[in-house]
């Protein structure tokens, strides 16, 4: 809590986003979240009751994100929840939605879950969920030693995209999103329109004009436990590739001693594959999608210079291939 206070003092022009993975066991951070202007928290949904919801309202939290899978078996596979806990999580989601909180359901897609998109969306709609965000399983953190055959390939998008689009039409009030790990969807847009989409949709918790906040080092992922600073917080389990500096716990100042070059100038020159200027007319609007996702999968495939690898999966290219350039006129625009 002291480190947050010092960060607010030292970097008054920055957004600070405390990121406990479970807010019900980190309630002491709620006053600081309010001070930082944070409106969203994460929870596994197992310990949410009326008193806790009142506490969230007291500290002006407007949105809660809870991970949910389409079946108890999938929930156990990913999060080791029992059947009873799975039902409790669904009850918590409904309770939060009925209280007026905006509920986002996070769901992880791999080869075992991509055929459950329709079932999950039906449950989310019935529970009062406002947004369902599909995240790509990446072999980092607890999934570092996952069976690699479960990871998504290009051909899996032929199942994912039609399923998501069908659910958009069936449940127009349920906002469906394929997260940054799938790259942006600029299909049917001019370059200027793509830039405007990025400007409007940029992450509210990072004051950056870029799709990925790591570009131009607009973002520091700080671990109060280790004192390490990372160019992407989601690579905290990969300090050998992502650590760029450290924070002085006493005064809250950050020192960058191992910088990586993710400047826009370098990315324009060095991006490869799908994200090279030769292969993507939207490069200037995107600059390589999610840099940590591109890095992880390029390294997995043996790329000798993964920092500048392109996204192996890109929504724009798949929408163009599956639906053609006119898809923007077919599907409801969602910014």
Image: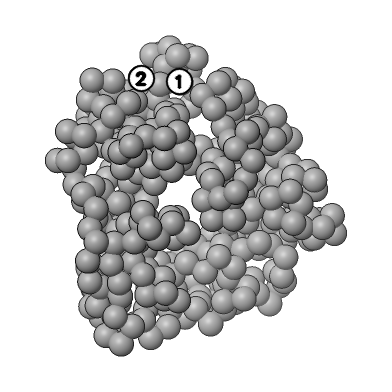
Q: Is residue 232 above or below residue 122?
A: below
Q: Secondary structure under badge 1?
A: helix
The spot of residue 89 in percent (x, y) is 74, 58
Q: Quadrant of residue 255?
A: bottom left
The residue lying toward the viewer, choosing from 199 and 116, is 116
Residue beneath label 1, please? 319
The spot of residue 145 in percent (x, y) is 60, 49
- Point 24% across, 61% down: residue: 258
Question: Neighbour class for label 2 at 10 Å: few (<14), some, many (≥20)?
Answer: some
How many marks overall?
A: 2
Q: Is residue 33 above or below residue 261?
A: below
Q: Secondary structure under badge 2?
A: loop
The outermost residue toward the right is: 84
Residue beneath label 2, please? 188
Q: Is residue 1 above or below residue 265?
A: below
- Point 21% across, 38% down: residue: 267
Circles 1 and 2, Cβ within 8 Å, touching? The answer is: yes
**Tag in front: 1 or 2:** 1
Q: Quadrant of residue 10?
A: bottom left
Q: Quadrant of the C terminus?
A: top left
Alpha carbons under labels 1 and 2: distance apart: 9 Å
Q: Is residue 329 above or below residue 85?
A: above
What numbered label is drawn on residue 148?
A: none
The spot of residue 130 in percent (x, y) is 59, 47
Question: Neighbour class for label 1 at 10 Å: few (<14), some, many (≥20)?
Answer: many
Q: Quadrant of residue 302?
A: top left
Q: Would you say 81 lies left or right of 262 here? A: right
- Point 28% across, 20% down: residue: 279
């Amino acid at each position: 809590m002291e480190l947050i206070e010092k960060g607010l003092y030292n970097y008054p022009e920055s957004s600070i986003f405390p990121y406990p993975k479970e807010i019900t066991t980190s309630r002491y951070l709620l006053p600081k979240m309010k001070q930082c202007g944070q409106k969203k928290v994460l929870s596994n949904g197992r310990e949410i009751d009326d008193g806790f919801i009142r506490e969230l309202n007291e500290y002006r939290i407007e949105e809660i994100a809870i991970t949910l899978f389409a079946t108890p078996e999938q929930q156990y596979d990913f999060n080791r929840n029992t059947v009873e806990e799975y039902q409790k999580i669904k009850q918590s989601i409904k309770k939060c939605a009925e209280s007026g909180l905006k509920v986002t359901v996070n769901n992880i897609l791999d080869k075992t879950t991509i055929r459950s998109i329709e079932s999950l969306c039906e449950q989310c709609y019935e529970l009062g969920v406002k947004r369902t965000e599909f995240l790509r399983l990446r072999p980092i953190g607890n999934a570092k030693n996952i069976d690699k055959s479960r990871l998504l390939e290009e051909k899996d998008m032929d199942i994912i995209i039609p399923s998501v689009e069908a659910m958009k039409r069936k449940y127009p009030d349920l906002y469906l999103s394929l997260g940054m790990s799938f790259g942006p969807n600029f299909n049917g847009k001019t370059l200027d329109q793509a830039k405007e989409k990025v400007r409007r949709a940029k992450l509210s918790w990072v004051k950056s004009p870029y799709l990925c906040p790591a570009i131009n080092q607009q973002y520091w992922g700080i671990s109060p436990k280790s004192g390490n600073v990372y160019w992407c917080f989601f690579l905290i389990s990969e300090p050998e590739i992502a650590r760029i500096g450290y924070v002085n716990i006493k005064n809250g100042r950050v020192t960058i001693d191992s910088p990586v070059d993710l400047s826009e100038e370098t990315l324009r020159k060095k991006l490869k594959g799908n994200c090279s200027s030769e292969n993507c007319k939207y490069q200037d609007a995107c600059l390589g999608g999610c840099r940590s996702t591109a890095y992880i999968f390029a390294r997995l495939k043996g790329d000798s210079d993964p920092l500048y690898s392109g996204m192996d999966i890109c929504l724009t290219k798949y929408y163009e291939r599956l639906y053609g350039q006119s898809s923007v006129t077919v599907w409801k625009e969602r910014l």
